[in-house]
Image: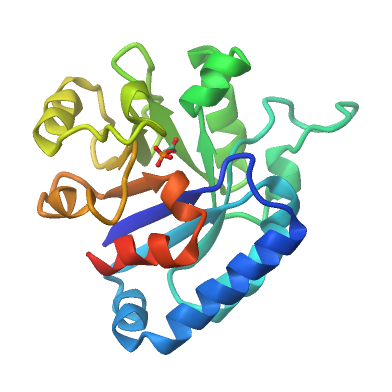
Amino acid sequence: MKYFIANWKANKNYEETTNWINEFTQILTNDSALHDKLTSDKVSIIIAPPAPFLISMKTVEATFKNIFVGAQDISNKQSGAFTGEVTAKTLKGLVMYSILGHSERRSNYGETNEMLAEKVKLAQEENIKPILCVRDTEDTIPPSVEYVAFEPVSAIGTGNNMPLQEVLENKAKLSLPSNALFIYGGSVKPETAFDYLTSDEIDGFLIGGASLQPSQFLDIVRLA
Ligand code: PGA
């Protein structure tokens, strides 16, 4: 099983989200080969839109096998008087996964390894699987994490995806929990994805820019 995680980041409004869902659903419905990849457990898709649109994505999750809704982040607060926060308790039952510790959150919002260990714990208490992003060996990985996304900062949004061999060298240096799945992220496009898919050591992708258009995103999934 290869995982394809769409990370929309802070993009799209309600109308654009509706259009994305309609186009995505139409492409999948008309492409039986792609549809078969999902039904035969060959691929799994996790879509992480901005929080207000998580609920819109539930219809897609309900329509297709192996498509799931994911959050882009969760609060490090449990619940209560924290206006504006979206907590794991709130997201329980709505999302199956959450991206945590993306480098954009570590650098723009000061998220530390300690804070992220807390977020991992809060997510798992509510049966939400964290997809923990790491930049290098400085970013620690709690042993309970099952999905680790290696995202070198130089590759994110730059068009400079890290070559497979280099990704594998970096993988070898990380202290991955045994059985953790290893996801690569950073300028994954239909033109760059194939190489990684030839390796059993790469379990999937975290896809930013190329997930904003359903056709481009699904072109990557088709390669699996
Ligand atoms: P990118 O983003 O695919 O646009 O490089 C990946 C990510 O930041 O998750």
**Left or right placement of residue 75 versus residue 110 in this view:** right
Q: Position of residue 50 (x, y in %)?
A: 66, 46
Give x and y (percent) for residue 110.
Answer: 59, 12
- Residue in front for this viewpoint, 129 or 190: 190
Residue at left offset 23%, top offset 35%: 178
Residue 16 vs 179, above or below: the answer is below
Left or right side of 64 for 177 = left
Q: Is residue 205 visible?
A: yes
User: Splitting the image into 4 quarters, where does residue 144 fall?
Assistant: top left
Location of the C terminus (image quadrant): bottom left
Question: In percent of the image, x 47 and y 23: which residue is there?
Answer: 103
Up-down relation of residue 154 to residue 218 (above or below): above
Q: Residue visible at 37% across and 31% down?
A: 158
Q: Identify whether 222 is placed above or below 17.
A: below
Give the quarter of the figure containing the N terminus.
Answer: bottom left
Here the colouring is rainbow
**Viewer-proximal residue among 4 and 82:** 4
Which of the 4 image quarters holds residue 40? bottom left
Residue 220 rendering spot, x and y as whole percentages: 31, 60
**Total numbered labels placed on residues in the image:** 0
Q: Quadrant of ligand 1?
A: top left
Q: Residue at x 32, y 36 (%)?
A: 159
In this picture, residue 148 sits left or right of residue 124: left
Which residue is more in the foreground, 160 or 51? 160
Q: Position of residue 81 (x, y in %)?
A: 90, 27
**Can I make out residue 224 in this image?**
no
Rendered image quadrant of residue 145:
top left
